[in-house]
Every structure is written in C-alpha cells, then in structure tokens.
Image (cartoon, rainbow, N blue to C red):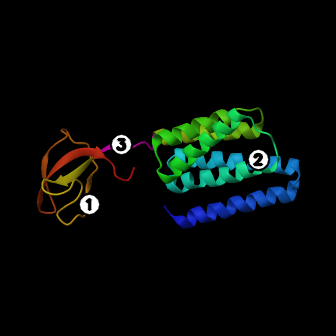
Amino acid sequence: MRRNVVLAGTAILAVMVALVLFVHGTDEQGLRAAIRATARTSALCTALAFARFRVREASALVPVSHTLHYALILATSRVLDAPTVLVGVAVFAVMVWNAIRPNAIAIYILWISFLVGMLRPGALYVMFVTLLLCAGIARWMRRPRLVARATTQIGCEGSNRVGRPLKSVGKALESSSASTQIDGENTRIEWCNHPNR
C-alpha cells in the first residue's frame, strides 16, 4: 500500500469537507451537505476498491471518509435510534476490517450497502448507482484468470533455484502439464492463478 496516496486522499477529504462547510455554512444545512458529500466519497472509494483499482489505498480511505461522515452526523445533535447506531457500527467495523485486510466478503458487503443506500430519487444518486454497477462490471472483467506458468521441478512454484520468477506462457496448451526447456532447466507447465491479479 502506498501511504502517500492514502495521506493525499485523507487531505483531499478534509479539504472537501472544509470547502462544503465554507460554502454552505456551519449550521444544520451546511452539516447536512457535508454529510451527503462524505457519504458519496465513501461510495466512490468503495467503487474503486470493488473494481480492483488501487484496492488497498481505496479500502483504507473508506473508513477515513466515513469517520468524517459519522463525526458530521454527531455534530448535528441528531438523536439516533438504537437500530441505526447498530447498523452504523457494524458497517464501520466491516470498513475497518476491509482496510486492514482487503477481502471479497467485506468489499461485497460494502458494495451492496452503498448500492442500496444510493437507491434514492435524484440525478446524482442515479449517477452513483451507475458508478457502483460499473464497478461491478469492472470487477467481473478484471477477475483472476487461469494462466499457464512455467515452474521448475525442484524449488518453489513460479520461481527458479534462486527465487526469480520464470517466464509466463502466453499461448494456450493442449494439455495442462508438459515438459519443455526454459533457461536451460527442465520445467513443467502448470495452471495457476496469475499472481498479479
């Protein structure tokens, strides 16, 4: 994870909230505008992570954005009922979990939560629902695929004796296992998950 990206994103979120409050004021109307803005930035970061675009950085920014979101809600002195608080705490826990260890279960929960939350009337909400759906398409298109990789018969998969990765095999093979010669060593071809996916 690139910390400078997360730090820059955090600074941008803080500046955005400050600008919204500066334009709309610090009264209840301004706070509500900032609450809506932080909800949308959380949805945007979730969409990026769901689409497998800078997953770690986007996942780390989701709880940052939502911390600002919750802080602004508390600043309105709005009385929250127990179910709302429990749902909010549970969603935030999933956000933190996904930020610490990005995983499919957490990101799907967040994606569905924001998709349902954005199902409201208004052109801007339609745009965010479309964005989240496009993120789902992008995730499907960028899903891990099975590729052929050459592995040495002795040593680790995908590496030679000194631990350097061997060349990927780009062409489809007639069988899942074959004997060939790469870099002067006997190797076998195996199907495995691409390590960069």
Residue at point 23% right, 64% down? Answer: 163
Vertical side of 31 occupied by 80: above or below: above
Residue on which disc 3 sits:
145
Q: Amino acid at mark 1?
A: Pro
Q: Earlier in the sequence, mark 1 or mark 2?
A: 2
- Range covered by the magenta-colored residues: 141-147
Percent x, y of residue 145:
36, 42
Vertical side of 196 occupied by 78: above or below: above
* Mark 3 secondary-structure assignment: loop
* Mark 1 secondary-structure assignment: loop
Q: Quick check: is 143 in the magenta stretch?
A: yes
Q: Nearer the viewer, residue 178 or 119?
A: 119
For disc 3, the neighbor class at 10 Å (few under 14, some 14 to 19, many from 20) is: few
Vertical side of 154 occupied by 50: above or below: above
Q: Which mark is on residue 73?
A: 2
Is residue 38 found left or right of 182 in the rendered image?
A: right
* Mark 2 secondary-structure assignment: helix
Q: Which mark is on residue 165?
A: 1
Percent x, y of residue 41:
67, 50
Residue at point 56% right, 53% down? Answer: 58
Residue at point 65% right, 40% down? Answer: 88
Q: Quadrant of residue 146?
A: top left
